[in-house]
Amino acid sequence: MKRNSLLLLTAIALLSSCASLKGEPRVYIMQNPETMEFKNCDVGVIGLDKHFKDNEECVEKLKKEGWIVWGKR
């Protein structure tokens, strides 16, 4: 059981490190200029291609609603 857990954690770490090599931000910090409210569009822990696509859709949806990109990381 411990060996399986260790293998799973290692696999997750490797996948997340590969995703960070994409050069794309994992988190977009969005701000509503009227209310000064903040929201994050986040890739998540694993960061597969689908998660990056979902993240881009989150950013575009909020931009259409008037939100601005306040920061990336």
Image: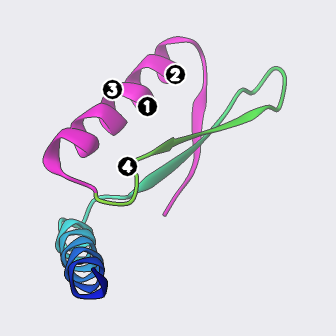
Residue 3 picture quarter: bottom left
Q: Which residue is mark 2?
A: 62
Residue in view at x 26 percent, y 71 percent? 12
Question: What's drawn in magenta, residue-wise?
Answer: 47-73
N-term mark: 2 or 4: 4
Q: Which residue is mark 1?
A: 59
SS state under label 2: helix
Q: Which residue is mark 4?
A: 43
Q: Are marks 1 and 3 in contact (CB under 8 Å)?
A: yes
The x and y percentages for residue 64 are: 48, 13
Residue in view at x 84 percent, y 23 percent? 35
Q: CA distance from mark 2 to mark 4?
A: 15 Å
Q: Are marks 4 and 3 in contact (CB under 8 Å)?
A: no
Q: CA distance from mark 4 to mark 3?
A: 11 Å
Q: Nearer the viewer, residue 43 or 33?
A: 43
Residue in view at x 29 percent, y 59 percent? 46
Q: Is disc 3 surrounded by few (<14), some (14 to 19) or many (20+) residues within 10 Å?
A: few
